[in-house]
Image (tube, rainbow, N blue to C red):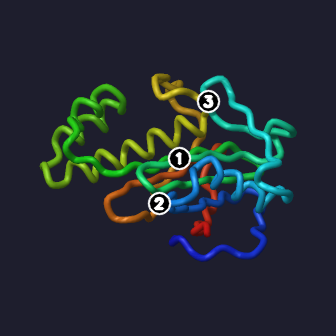
């Protein structure tokens, strides 16, 4: 799976998840999101009205079940995930190895994941932590809960997979209802 040039009119089949990668050098993430949504909904990006769920997850103001989507950005890189018949979550993070990754892992990740981060050799620790972190955050965003929430155990059926992304970044996408085909495009 690699990010490719998008088709003129993306066809979002049932069960599929599309992930769009965008550079934010001149366009803010919110406009990028609206431009991606306009490719599926028609109309102008400025006409798309959004609202937020209880924990801030964006939704369409009118007909929210029509299209599920999620946005994440870090530095100058943004990802937008889109699906028609399932919830989605996406996360992208710039790797910052100078952070106390063990402390963050012990606070936020599952005990086994935190132990793996703690045991990892220093050169490998950042890659491991950010891979686990983006999967964790994508899952929580898919479920529509805040980062402070601890989802039920066992967690609902949410498929999570890492995404190929730029060096110095980690990314993942999550979709409700189990494994799904993911197609990746570069926006703009």
How far is mark 2 from mark 1, CA to CA? 13 Å
Query: Toward the viewer: 84 or 167?
Result: 167
Relative to 3, is 63 on the left or the right?
right
> Where is residue 125 drawn, in percent x and y?
21, 48
Dot 3 surroundings within 10 Å: few (below 14), some, or many (20 or more)? Answer: few
Query: Toward the viewer: 78 or 84?
Result: 78
To which residue does mark 2 refer? 163
Q: Is residue 84 above or below residue 146?
A: below
Residue positioned 23% across, 29% down in the render: 103
Mark 2 or 3: in front is 3
What numbered label is drawn on residue 56?
A: 3
Residue positioned 79% across, 41% down in the render: 49
Relative to 61, is 72 on the left or the right?
left
Whichever of callouts 3 and 1 sits on the residue coming sooner in the sequence is 3
Whichever of callouts 2 and 1 sits on the residue coming sooner in the sequence is 1
Residue positioned 73% across, 33% down in the render: 51
Q: Is residue 83 above or below residue 119?
A: below
> Where is residue 37 drawn, in percent x and y?
74, 54
Q: Seen from this angle, which residue lies furthest front?
A: 26
Mark 1 element type: strand
Whichever of callouts 2 and 3 sits on the residue coming sooner in the sequence is 3
Q: Residue 124 sits in which quadrant?
A: bottom left
Q: Is residue 170 above or below residue 1?
A: above
How far is mark 2 from mark 3, CA to CA? 23 Å
Dot 1 surroundings within 10 Å: few (below 14), some, or many (20 or more)? Answer: many
> Where is residue 149 drawn, in percent x and y?
49, 23
Mark 3 element type: loop
To which residue does mark 1 refer? 72
Residue positioned 55% across, 62% down in the render: 21
């Amino acid at each position: 799976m690699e990010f490719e040039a998008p088709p003129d009119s993306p066809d979002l089949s049932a069960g599929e998840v599309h992930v769009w990668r965008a550079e934010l050098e001149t366009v803010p993430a919110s406009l990028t999101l609206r431009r991606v949504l306009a490719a599926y909904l028609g109309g102008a990006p400025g006409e798309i009205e959004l609202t937020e769920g209880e924990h801030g997850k964006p939704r369409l103001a009118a007909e929210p079940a029509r299209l599920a989507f999620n946005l994440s950005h870090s530095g100058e890189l943004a990802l937008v995930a889109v699906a028609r018949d399932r919830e989605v979550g996406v996360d992208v993070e710039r790797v910052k190895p100078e952070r106390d990754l063990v402390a963050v892992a012990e606070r936020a990740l599952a005990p086994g994941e935190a132990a793996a981060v703690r045991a990892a050799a220093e050169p490998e620790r950042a890659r491991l932590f950010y891979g686990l972190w983006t999967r964790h955050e994508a899952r929580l965003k898919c479920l529509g809960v805040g980062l402070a929430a601890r989802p039920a155990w066992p967690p609902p059926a949410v498929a999570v997979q890492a995404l190929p992304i730029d060096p110095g970044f980690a990314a993942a996408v999550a979709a409700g209802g189990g494994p799904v085909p993911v197609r990746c495009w570069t926006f703009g």
